[in-house]
Image: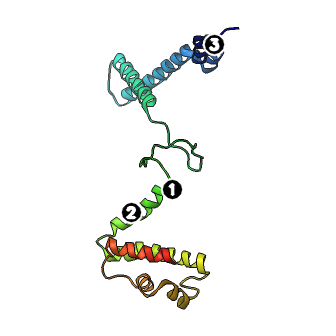
Amino acid sequence: MSTSIDDLLGSAEEEHPAQEAARGGRVGGALKALAVAGALTAVVVAGLRAVGLQLSLWVVVAGVLALLAVRRVTAALAPPPPPRSGSRIPAGEEDGHYHWASRDALRAAINGWERPLDWSSDNPQRFAERILPRLGELADERLRQRHGVTRESDPARARALLGDRLSTFLDTPPRRTPSPRDLVAIVAELEKI
């Protein structure tokens, strides 16, 4: 029993008649396209006549066929849909670069901080309304996880654990928006909790 490479590769690429018939085949696809084109042409002609416009039937048919062709080409060239959230991404070799277009939790977290920080960079009131509560929630969560307290449940112990600088920063709205260097120092203090 001998099998050539052409036999092995050719059988995988050739479509079986049963699969083609189940899918409708080329004739079925062409008939479906013509039926859709005919229906759309009838709707367009009826709509044009309803508003009192006359247009050659061949022009309408050509326009409908052109639109269907453009639709088919754009559908064929469209990128694949993004993976559904919650679905498992197959593991494999990575190229070592961050893919900014991909949807992942890291990018979502970065955007969750980047946009509000940028938006409030020159407005202390916005910073106090948007960023300060988030930082306070982070501090409370770190305190709760590591020490079993929050700023609300035991203010004295929380202040001692946070330190005067961080506690004062979280409790009083700043008169000016902190610089990036100040924010780095604050985050470092939060990480020490």
Q: Earlier in the sequence, mark 1 or mark 2?
A: 1
For residue 124, which quarter of the picture? bottom left
Residue sitting nearer the eye, 8 or 115: 8
User: Is disc 2 surrounded by few (<14), some (14 to 19) or many (20+) residues within 10 Å?
Assistant: few
Outermost residue, left side: 122
Q: Mark 1 vs mark 3: which is more N-terminal? A: 3
Figure coloring: rainbow
Q: What residue type is labelled 3?
A: Pro
The residue at which mark 3 appears reads as 17
Question: Element under label 1?
Answer: helix
Q: Give the percent coordinates (x, y) of residue 33.
A: 49, 20
Residue 145 lies, with reference to residue 84, above or below; the image says: below
Quadrant of residue 166 within the rendered picture: bottom left
Dot 1 amino acid type? Ala
Disc 2, SS: helix
Quarter of the image for the N terminus: give it. Answer: top right
Q: Distance between the residues labelled 2 and 3?
A: 56 Å
Residue wearing tag 1: 105
> Compared to 13, does 97 lie above or below?
below
Q: Is mark 3 on a helix, strand or loop?
A: helix
Q: Who's the residue at 35% across and 82% down the image?
A: 174
Percent of width and height locating residue 8 = 61, 15
Q: Give the labeled residue for mark 2.
A: 114
Cα separation between marks 1 and 2: 14 Å
Disc 3 crowd rating (10 Å Cα; few below 14, some 14-19, many 20+) is few
Dot 1 surroundings within 10 Å: few (below 14), some, or many (20 or more)?
few
